[in-house]
Each structure stands twice: as C-alpha cells, then as structure tokens.
Image (cartoon, rainbow, N blue to C red):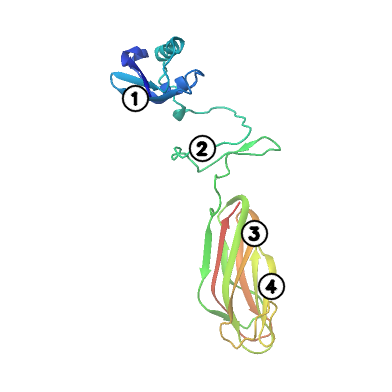
Amino acid sequence: MNYLYTYQITDFPNSEVDLSALENEISKNNSLVDILDYINMTSPIVDIYFTEELSVGEQNMLDTIVENHDPTDNPQESQIAGDVSIGGSIYINSTASDLDQSNFAVVDPSSGLCDSTIPFSVYGTEFHWAENMGVSSTTSSSFLTKVSLTTSNLPSGTYRIIVNYGWSQSDGDGAFEGRVLLNSNQLGETHKVYPTTGDKFGNGNIDNDWLDFSSREFAQILSGVNTVEIQWRQSGGNTAKIADANIQIFRVL
C-alpha cells in the first residue's frame, strides 16, 4: 500500500522542482530513505509516495525538505574539481554512456602522481601497416630489404610487431635467409632454409616452389619514431625469393 503526500509547485522555492534532486534530498534523511517509493509531478502538483504512513515528525521533515529544495542538487550532474583520493573500487553504471573514455587518469601508486595522458584503452591504437606483395628474387649474399615500415612519433608503451612473408629458393648450395630488424638491430634468430637438408625449424626440402610462409611476432617497448624491416638473402649464390611481405605494429599496453 502506498501513502501519498501532495504538494503544490508553489510550495517549493521559486516554484522550481527537480525530481532527481528531490529524491536525493529525501534519501539523505535516515527516517525517510527506506520508505520512499517514488515521486511523480503533473504540474502544478507534486506527489510523493511512501510505502509506510509518515509520523507527524517525519511529515515535518518532509515539509522542511520541500521548503528548502535545491533543484541543482542532482547527483547525475555532479562534477569533481581539484584533488581526489579514493580508496577501494570505483563503479560506473550503464547510465554513463556519454562518459568520455578517450583518456583516463592512471595513478602511479609509488609516487601518487596521476598521468591523464594514458588512454583508457590503448590496445590496438597506434596501428601501422606496410606491405610489398610482389615477388622479389636475389642471388646476393648481402641482405636486401623487402619491405620497411617507419612509424609516426609513438607514445611510450608496449607494442606488438607482426611480420609475414612467403619464401622459396632454387636447389643448390646455400640457404634462403630472412631476418627482421628494428632500428637496424635484429629481432630474434635469422630464418634459414637449406634446399637439400631442410630448415633449422624442421621444414622439408625445397624444389624452387613456394614452400611455406613465415609469420613472426615480437613484443617491444617503444617510443618515438621506429623503423622495422624485413630483409632476405641467398647465402650460397643460388636464387632466393620472397613475396607477400607485410609488417604491422600496434600498441598493447
């Protein structure tokens, strides 16, 4: 059963009412918060419903709240200015769909300093891509660059580097060799493939067809401008081929 208490809009200061603010004001009263049901306004009438009948003292409290109502006391429009110290967890409900998540303040627990330049979610940002899909061949024992990617000025963070390429070579001495460079420094091992004995990763013999495609991934802490290269060569004078080469870089942390 509901108990109705009716007010005229003129009972409120300046004849102004904000229902969310009024509900918030009533909820601050320990005697009324648990029995408040809902509030309805059909101007000029404001109806306040409770699940229990109010005592004389409780009705006087309600009258005082109405007489001192502040329509700007709306918790849904609260703003925080200055320094805030929070212990425990913060929960944001689904009504905050308009929350600007482009940046989120992250606090360094050791220093207590806040860095608002770190995006709320960085995974997949700072994406860069370069490719060279054509077939290239060489008999040179010097490394040649198949594809190169130079980034923009990256913010400091952890990045994933992914490289892919197809390879083959003719029968004979020597090996197809492929490598990945980051700022002229090699990442990981050299990929070596021998035509008669198979490669160092367990692949079989080569007959000048496209034997396989190589896909390699690296995680690196980067900042600023960086250059990644896929290079290849033939170590014994035969023909080594490379095709469908691409590089991608994106931030993960």
* Residue drawn at the location 42% of the way across and 23% of the way down: 51
Foreground: disc 1 or disc 3: 1
Label 3 sits on what residue type? Answer: Ala
> Callout 1: helix, strand or loop?
strand
Q: CA distance from mark 4 to mark 3?
A: 17 Å
Instruction: Provide the residue designation for mark 4.
Output: 190
Q: Give the x, y percent position of residue 145.
A: 60, 72
Label 4 sits on what residue type? Answer: Thr
In the displayed structure image, the side of residue 139 where residue 129 appears, left or right = left
Q: Residue 92 got which mark?
A: 2
* Residue 249 visible at all: yes
Instruction: Rate crowding at label 3 as few (under 14), some (14 to 19) or many (20 or more) other CA atoms within 10 Å.
Output: some
* Location of residue 29 with respect to 80 vertically, above or below: above
Instruction: Provide the residue designation for mark 3.
Output: 219
Foreground: disc 1 or disc 2: 1
In the displayed structure image, the side of residue 110 where residue 6 appears, left or right = left
Q: Give the x, y percent position of residue 8.
A: 31, 15
* Residue drawn at the location 55% of the way across and 40% of the way down: 104
> Callout 3: helix, strand or loop?
strand
* Residue drawn at the location 43% of the way across and 11% of the way down: 64
Q: Mark 4 or mark 2: which comes first in sequence?
A: 2
Q: CA distance from mark 1 to mark 2?
A: 27 Å
Foreground: disc 4 or disc 2: 2
Q: Mark 1 or mark 2: which comes first in sequence?
A: 1
Q: CA distance from mark 4 to mark 1?
A: 74 Å
Return the residue nearer the eye: 205 or 12.
12
Foreground: disc 3 or disc 2: 2
